[in-house]
Amino acid sequence: MRRTLTDFLGSVLDAPISRLRNWAIGVAICAAGVIGTIYYAAAAALLALEPKVGAIYAHLILAAVFLVIALLAIAIPRLMASRSDSIAERAHAQAKAMPKNERLAMVIEALLAGFNASTSRKTAGKP
């Protein structure tokens, strides 16, 4: 069975899009829990710190803690991200695995699709 260009692009982009969707759902759930936790933890920390260090230093300590949390939130995903094959590398490997005549057919199909898209735009504006 001959694969079309859209089938090829769909199979290449399927895994990264599903990973991104799952990651976004996880981040949304975590964010909801973290917001509530931070609110109650901040209130408890201020109540505990004010008698010991004063109101101003209690707020400064809490601000420093929030800064550390923000920096960790940026750094940890970057450090833990897997270094899997990029989309371009995966597409190149799939294209190499295809027979030569299918690769040529896919290039011709892309050229025809581009030509059709460019000519339909020019004729659509004319009366």
Image (spheres, rainbow, N blue to C red):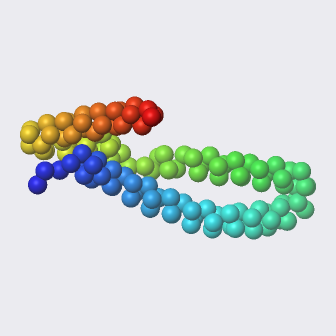
| Image quarter of residue 27 | bottom right
| Image quarter of residue 48 | bottom right
- Counting every numbered tag in the picture gives 0
Residue 12 shows in this picture: no
Q: Is residue 75 left or right of residue 55?
A: left
The front one of 87 and 106 is 106
Q: Residue at (30%, 37%) from the top-left corner? A: 116
Q: Is residue 99 above or below residue 118?
A: below
Q: Position of residue 45 (x, y in %)?
A: 79, 63
| Image quarter of residue 121 | top left
Q: Position of residue 3 (x, y in %)?
A: 17, 50
Q: Residue at (39%, 54%) from the top-left corner? A: 17
The front one of 113 and 58 is 113
Q: Is residue 111 left or right of residue 15?
A: left
Q: Is residue 23 left or right of residue 118?
A: right
Q: Residue at (68%, 63%) from the top-left corner? A: 35
Q: Which image quadrant: the C terminus?
A: top left
Residue 9 shows in this picture: yes
Q: Residue furthest front?
A: 127
Q: Is residue 16 left or right of residue 96?
A: right
Q: Position of residue 59 (x, y in %)?
A: 84, 53
Q: Is residue 80 above or below residue 117?
A: below
Q: Which image quadrant: the N terminus?
A: bottom left
Q: Residue at (89%, 51%) from the top-left corner? A: 56
Q: Position of residue 30 (x, y in %)?
A: 57, 64
